[in-house]
Structures are given as structure tokens and as C-alpha cells.
Image: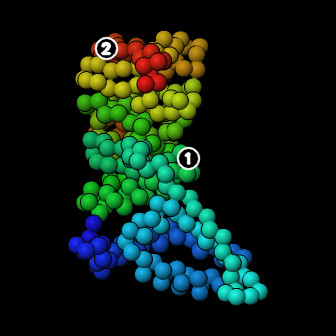
Amino acid sequence: RGTMDEEGNALEGPELDALREFASEYLVYNTSKIPDEEQAQERYKKMIIGRAHPKDLVRIIMLQPEIVLEHTGSNTGFAATYIQRPIMNIFFMRDQMISTARGIVIGRMNSPQREAESHVAEFCLDKIGMPPIGHIDAEGAFLEGGDFLPFGKNAFIGRGLRTTQEAIDQLMDNDWIGCDTLIVVKDRWLEQEQMHLDTYFNVIDHDLVTLSENRYKATADSSQYLTADIYVREENSYRKVGENEDFVNYIENRLHVKVIPVSRPDELT
């Protein structure tokens, strides 16, 4: 938006300048084998970015190209190897951020190949006038959106394969959640098939949820058994009021919410 005119030609202005600057971060000229060329190649890269069409700038961002250069003894004097690291999972737009009662928090993906997605999401959010209220960046902190589920004045957040306690602590320390009670659902199974909270648990209504049958029936000696830590908001901070509580019991008997167990075949479809 704001980078092309009605005929599709590049439209000079702050929107295009911002896109150029952002795309420049994703185009790498690797001169490690020819360090004497670093400054010259940086100038060349700036020229290429300045001449690229906005659609090509988007392609640069999405493909993350790296051009590895080395000297040759003839012709152009350079040989190049081309590497691409495509941002290929960004259609899963629930994972890069969470939307809380306070606003949008940019997460930190727990897989290197998806790390760039949060930066792309933030660029787009800033552009449409919805700047995030914070970013997960603490030591050891990872947060993916599939682990966060709002629930009225409460919220659930999964701690397990993808989201860490350090990220949950950063959310609470900065009061980025804004709900009365935060229920941290602790997963010890750590299997890819149920990588996020919303792959085995989901909210239907204020008094109705679903839970995968293997979790619902799991006993305390099973790795699939779920426990929960309960935090209550007091002014601008959170205090832990429950630890390692039986998650199913908490849902049914403390929150008085009906649980529908989901069979394995239904879960897979």
C-alpha cells in the first residue's frame, strides 16, 4: 500500500522508502571470501534496492536471498552462488503474535526457519496503524500464538514444546495480558503432533471447551497428563495462587466448564 500508482509503477515517498529499508535487511551480499569488496558490494546492493519494483522488494523479503561472491581470474572477475531461505509458513498467521486484552504482542518463534515471520508481521501491523505493545525478547523466551487462548476475563497459555516460561514471565512482568487470571497449561509430552495448546484444547463458549481424549484421560504418571499454574492479576502484576493443579479438574470443578473429549480420529480430521 502506498508504494505503487494506479498503473502499477513505483510511487516515490515514505511508504516506498520504508519498504526499501525493510527489504534491504533480507538481501545479503556475502563477501566473506572477498573482504576487500565489502564496501563496493554494499553500495551495489543499495543501488539494486533503490531500483527494484515494490513487488520485487516483497519477493526479496519472502525469499531472503543470499549472494555468496568470490573472485575469478577472468571475465567479470566474480563468481556467485545463490541461496534462498523462503519464508514459507507465513500463511499460519496465528503464530507470530498474540492478541490480548491490552493489545498485540509480537512473539518469538521457536524454530529458526520461522524467525523472520514476526518481523514481517510487525512491519505490516505498523503500516496499518496497529503497532504492537511489546515484543518477546527475554533470555530463553519463546512465544507462539497457537499457545494463547483468551477466555473472557481469563486467559489460557500453553507452556511446552514451543512457548517457554521465560516468555510467560515477560508477559506478566510487563502487564501485557490484562486479564484477571492467567492459566498456564504445562505440557510434559512435548510432541510435534500437539505442539501448541490449540492443537489439543480449544474454547467453544464461556462454559464449553474441547480437549483431546488422550489428555482428558491421562493419569498423573503419564507424560500426557496436564497440570496448570494459576496466576491472579493484582494491580499491574501477577501473583501465583496455584501450582501443578490437575488441569481437567480445574476446568470442570473450579471454572465449572463442560469438557468435550475429542477422539483421536476426530482430532486428526
The amino acid at mark 1 is Ser
User: Would you call the spot at circle 2 few (<14 residues within 10 Å), some (14-19), or many (20 or more)?
Assistant: some
Relative side of 256 to 53, left or right: left
Locate residue 131, reporting x and y percent: 30, 57
Residue where numbered disc 1 is placed: 111
The quadrant of the image that shows the C terminus is top left
Question: How many numbered callouts?
Answer: 2
Residue visible at 65% across and 85% down in the picture: 37
Q: Secondary structure at mark 2?
A: strand
The relative height of residue 153 versus residue 41 in the rendered view (above or below) is above
In terms of depth relative to the viewer, which is nearer, 198 or 181? 198
In the rendered image, which quarter is residue 168 located in?
Answer: top left
The amino acid at mark 2 is Lys
In terms of depth relative to the viewer, which is nearer, 53 or 155? 53
Relative side of 234 to 59, left or right: left
Locate residue 121, reporting x and y percent: 38, 55
Between the C-alphas of marks 1 and 2, the distance is 34 Å
Locate residue 236, reporting x and y percent: 31, 42
> In terms of sequence position, does the residue under pointer 1 or pointer 2 come before the other?
1
* Label drawn at residue 51: none
Residue where numbered disc 2 is placed: 258
Residue visible at 35% across and 15% down in the picture: 259
In terms of depth relative to the viewer, which is nearer, 37 or 163? 37
The relative height of residue 53 versus residue 97 in the rendered view (above or below) is below
Would you say residue 124 is visible in this rendering?
A: yes
Would you say residue 136 is visible in this rendering?
A: no
Residue visible at 25% across and 30% down in the picture: 152
Q: Secondary structure at mark 1?
A: loop
The relative height of residue 18 versus residue 62 in the rendered view (above or below) is below
Residue visible at 30% across and 42% down in the picture: 100
User: Would you call the spot at circle 1 few (<14 residues within 10 Å), some (14-19), or many (20 or more)?
Assistant: few
